[in-house]
Image (cartoon, rainbow, N blue to C red):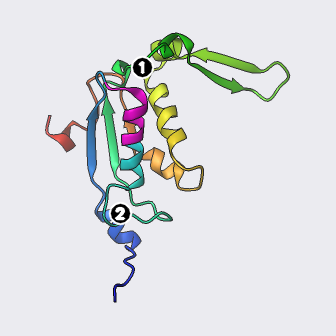
Amino acid sequence: MTKTFLPSVKEVETTRKWHHIDATGQTLGRLASQIAVLLMGKHKRTYTPHMDCGDFVVVTNAGKIKLTGNKMEQKVYFSHSGYAKGAKETPVKRMLEKNPTRVLELAVKRMLDENKLRAPRMKRLRLFAGEEHAFTERFGK
């Protein structure tokens, strides 16, 4: 008879790993889903849906991601201030020029479940527009 394994919180905290991903030339959606899996911990044997057992992810060159098809001209991000006529539409092309990490951050955030675990998972995601980042000692570069 097999028993269900439930990792302890201390065990989860001590076994977190760091992953480095270079986003140069990678497709936005495929990269975002790969990052979401690492943040949730679904790649681990000890994955538990109600626990935050994911790893840290550092992404460099977020400004060099690619979008397929006509998304560069057609994709639009919508936000609303809450006031009348407070709607804003920002094309992805302008968002990539202004803040390239925001595009990838929104894609990953929207792939995670909308619950109390999303905020701590997003805190473990580090995005950098260029090659330089503050975590070089972790990866030996």
Residue 75: quadrant of the picture: top right
Q: Which residues are magenta?
A: 26-34
Q: Residue furthest bottom?
A: 1
Q: Residues within 10 Å of mark 2 (few under 14, many from 20)?
A: few
Tag 1 secondary structure: loop
Q: Which residue is mark 2?
A: 13
| Front one among 30 and 6 | 30
Picture residue at 31% right of the left edge, 57% below the top: 16
* Residue identified by numbered label 1: 67
Residue lying at 21% horizontally and 36% vertically, measured from the top left? 136
Numbered label tally: 2
Marks 2 and 1, the one that precedes in the sequence: 2
Question: Residue placed at 51% from the left, 65% from the top?
Answer: 50
Q: State yes or no: residue 49 in magenta.
A: no
In the depicted structure, whether residue 127 falls above or below residue 54: above
Quadrant for the N terminus in the image: bottom left
Considering every residue shown, the one lying at the far left of the view is 140
Residue 62's x, y, as percent?
36, 25
Query: Residue 123, how many percent across, how many down?
Result: 45, 45
Q: Picture coordinates of residue 31 (x, y %)? A: 37, 34
Residue at the (34%, 52%) spot, across then down: 55
Pick whichever, 68 or 42, lies toward us.
68
Query: Alpha carbon of mark 2 to alpha carbon of mark 1: how far?
Result: 35 Å
Q: Secondary structure at mark 2?
A: helix
Q: Is residue 126 above or below residue 86?
A: below
The part of the image, by quadrant, that contains residue 116 is bottom right
Instruction: Tell me residue 48's x, y (percent).
Output: 43, 66
